[in-house]
Image (tube, rainbow, N blue to C red):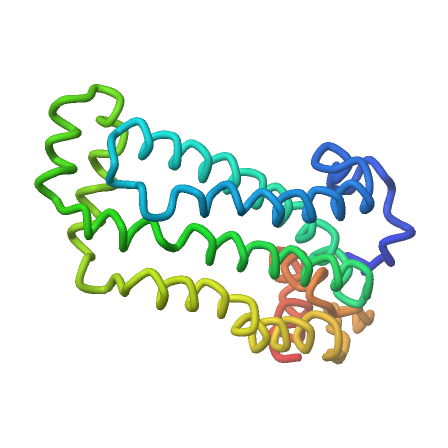
Amino acid sequence: MPTALPRSKVKKNQTWDAESVFPSPEAFDAEVKNLVASLAEVKKFQGHIGDNPDTFLAAMENIETISKRATKVRVYATMSSSVDAINQEAAAMNGTAGSALAQVSAATSFIDPELLSVGETKLRGWLADDPRMRLYEHYFNDLFRKQTHVRNAEVEELLGMLSDPFRGTSNTVSMLANADFKFKPAHESQNKRIELTQSTYNAIMDGTDREARRTAWKN
């Protein structure tokens, strides 16, 4: 039956290859700083999305690049915090990533309100006249489908920034469930005790011992 090992005891080849994302926590910190600094480039497009297809496409390419970088930051932080919920350095890293993503969300939030103000007629014209724009046909369809739920740029930016503090409740629940709560052990049919944690629960429930499954579920 499974035993919960401290992270330091897990063989390297059985862990996530975090170094393939960033070679070190220092590299992660540097990228977060660079990512936040690069948001000024996105804001330069604000107020100009509707100028012409070239400007729109340049803005979307910039945003896509930043979004990919933000996702990479988030993945690395999650790889660190998910495997050891009581690791304070990993928790801090996760918080740093969450804050950076909130800033990305806020910085790019002007896109949808501004496109709606440009108007469907003009955007449909771009689709018809410029083959490069065809990639965004579904995006435009979806945008105008949900337009009654899109607020103005100022409100959308505020909502983007609020994603960071609003994560507090979710983070609290996660820490309680994954780090603070201690569960009574499960028992095999031969009454052997099995350590019960978030990391061993699924393996016990997938096992063949019915009593182990029953007591794991109950506890």
**Residue sitting at 51 percent across and 41 percent down?**
41
Location of residue 113 by image quarter:
bottom left
Q: With 9 as the anchor, is 47 left or right in this view?
A: left
Where does the N terminus fall, quadrant-wise?
bottom right
| Residue 90 or residue 183, whichever sits in front | 90
**Residue sitting at 67 percent across and 43 percent down?**
34
In the rendered image, residue 193, in percent from the top left (x then y), is placed at 82, 71
Any part of residue 1 in sight: no
In the rendered image, residue 85, in percent from the top left (x then y), is placed at 75, 65
In the rendered image, residue 167, in percent from the top left (x then y), is placed at 55, 70
Which residue is the extreme one toward the left?
121
Where does the C terminus fall, quadrant-wise?
bottom right
Which residue is the extreme one toward the right?
9
Any part of residue 11 in sight: yes
**Residue sitting at 53 percent across and 46 percent down?**
40
For residue 108, above or below residue 31: below
In the rendered image, residue 156, in percent from the top left (x then y), is placed at 36, 63
Q: With 177 as the anchor, is 182 left or right in this view?
A: right
For residue 71, above or below residue 210: above
**Residue sitting at 77 percent across and 57 percent down?**
2
- Give the total number of marks visible in the rendering: 0
Which residue is the extreme one toward the top?
131
| Residue 23 or residue 43, whichever sits in front | 43
